[in-house]
Image (spheres, rainbow, N blue to C red):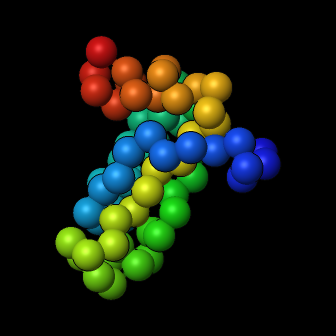
Amino acid sequence: MQTDDLTVVAEFTTSVEAELAKAALASAGIYAEIQNECMADIYPGVITARLLVPAERLDEAQCLLRGK
């Protein structure tokens, strides 16, 4: 997967929240990766963990994370 094709679908204050969302996407067959995972835990509330998905699956990922 080329990282140029990834876009932010959500931001989380902790890496645990981001990992749970990533797992939910993976169970639906959507590739995802987390940016700033460690920094979000070192600087909570300052730096967020950003969940990235392929741009072409953005709408699907947003619906899944919203529970729709």
Q: How many marks?
A: 0
Work out whether residue 31 can be spotted: no
Percent position of residue 6, x then y: 63, 44
Q: Position of residue 11 (x, y in %)?
A: 35, 52
Q: Residue furthest top?
A: 68
Q: Residue furthest right?
A: 2
Please report the residue visible at 56 percent of the width from the left and 43 percent of the height from the top: 7
Residue that appears at 44% across and 40% down: 9
Residue sitting at x 78%, y 48%: 2
Going by the image, does 11 lie left or right of 45?
right
Name the quarter where the C terminus is drawn: top left
Query: Considering only vertical position in the picture, is 43 above or below 22?
Result: below
Q: Residue furthest left?
A: 45
Left or right: 12 as drawn, with respect to 24: left
Q: Which of 17 and 4 lies nearest the eye of the viewer?
A: 4
Which of the image's four quarters has the N terminus?
top right
Location of residue 60 with respect to 55 vertically, above or below: above
Q: Is residue 15 left or right of residue 25?
A: left
On the image, the x and y values in percent for residue 33 come to 57, 52
Q: Say which residue appears at 64% left-offset and 26% top-offset.
A: 56
Q: Is residue 59 at least partly visible in the picture?
A: yes
For residue 50, above or below residue 32: below
19 is higher (above) or lower (below) than 22: below
